[in-house]
Image (cartoon, rainbow, N blue to C red):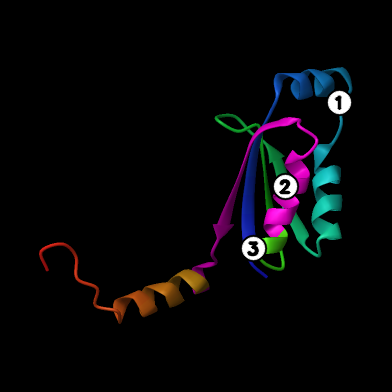
Amino acid sequence: MPLYMVQWSYTAEATAAMAKNPQDRSVNTQQLIEKLGGTQIGCYFCFGDYDGLAICEMPDGVTMLAGAMAASAPGHLNVIRTTRLFTMDEAVEAMKRAGTLGYAGPGG
């Protein structure tokens, strides 16, 4: 199953609501992912441009897109960013394929 990293940042209102009523948001993300036939590998809060991230396996890109849309629908997120992750085996296979293509760059 394809792997995805989902990063998000909360609105100021959502952050204030969580400070007032602390909760484990990984439960909510896990439930959504499981409804879509996926598996949550991890869910974290973090420093930087994003407030949190989750790593999950999802059946396909359309299913992942549906999950991202559902997660952002309540309006508590400023930003949601989804990145498809590739295993090392997948990356090596891509490298092998790329090596056989012989694409010429500019001036080549």
Q: Residue at x 10, y 64 (%)?
A: 107
Q: Which quarter of the figure is the C terminus placed in? A: bottom left
Q: Nearer the viewer, residue 48 or 61?
A: 61
In the rendered image, which quarter is residue 12 located in? top right
Whether residue 83 sits left or right of residue 53 in the image: it is left
Mark 3: which amino acid?
Gly
Q: Which residue is mark 2?
A: 69
Q: Residue at x 67, y 67 (%)?
A: 60
Which tag, 2 or 1, sits closer to the chain's start? 1
Query: What label does residue 61 carry, if any?
Result: 3
Q: Is residue 19 above or below residue 95?
A: above
Which tag, 3 or 1, sits closer to the chain's start? 1
**Element under label 2?**
helix
Q: Position of residue 18 (x, y in %)?
A: 82, 24
Q: Residue at x 55, y 29 (%)?
A: 48
Q: Label 2: how many residues lie within 10 Å, few (<14), some (14-19) or many (20+)? A: few
Which tag, 3 or 2, sits closer to the chain's start? 3
Q: Label 3: how many residues lie within 10 Å, few (<14), some (14-19) or many (20+)? A: few
Mark 2: which amino acid?
Met
Q: Which residue is mark 1?
A: 22
Q: Label 1: how many residues lie within 10 Å, few (<14), some (14-19) or many (20+)? A: few
Q: Which residues are magenta?
A: 64-89
